[in-house]
Amino acid sequence: MRAELGFQKWEAMGHFFNDGDYLGFNQSNYRGAIAQYERAWELLSTPWQQETGGADILEGIADFALRSKDPELAAEILGGLLHRANPIDDASLRDACDKVAQLASQQPQD
């Protein structure tokens, strides 16, 4: 993956993950953590990169949404998460998406 992405993108991804992990795990800033992981996703510019490295990134996004226990946040990210996860054949990613969908369904209806 590193050779496919190139050194600069690889390093940038590492910074986004570090920043996201810090925000999510140390500050409970789950929106900020998700934003950092989404920045890492944006560096995956080919379908191969998305299929190869994308599942871990998307699972990280789902994990932060679940840790937040915020149905509104889960609902906000669910559409984009499912759209990006759809072409990736990964059982644990599907399970994570299902859990985010369950959390999002707990959002109060107007």
Image (cartoon, rainbow, N blue to C red):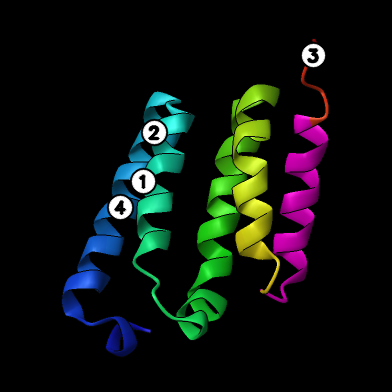
Q: CA distance from mark 1 to mark 4?
A: 5 Å
* Type of amino acid at the residue the image marks with label 1: Gln
Task: Single out the residue that lies furthest toward the top.
Answer: 110
Report the mark closest to the observer, 4 or 3: 3
Instruction: Name the residue beneath numbered marker 3.
Output: 108
Q: Is residue 46 left or right of residue 86?
A: left
Instruction: Name the residue beneath numbered marker 4.
Output: 16
Query: How many C-alpha atoms fall within 10 Å of the one at disc 2: few (<14), some, or many (≥20)?
Result: some
Is the Cβ of the residue at disc 1 closer than 8 Å to that at disc 2? yes
Residue 70 screen position, x and y as percent: 65, 23
Q: Is residue 43 left or right of residue 71?
A: left
Q: Is residue 25 left or right of residue 6?
A: right
Q: Secondary structure at mark 4?
A: helix
Instruction: Name the residue beneath numbered marker 2.
Output: 32
Is the Cβ of the residue at disc 4 closer than 8 Å to that at disc 3? no
Query: How many C-alpha atoms fall within 10 Å of the one at disc 3: few (<14), some, or many (≥20)?
Result: few
Instruction: Name the residue beneath numbered marker 1.
Output: 36
Q: Secondary structure at mark 1?
A: helix
Is the Cβ of the residue at disc 3 closer than 8 Å to that at disc 1? no
Front residue (pair 107, 96) = 107
Which badge, 4 or 3, comes first in the chain's sequence?
Answer: 4
- Is 94 included in the stretch rendered in magenta? yes
Q: Which residues are magenta?
A: 88-104
Residue 3 screen position, x and y as percent: 28, 89
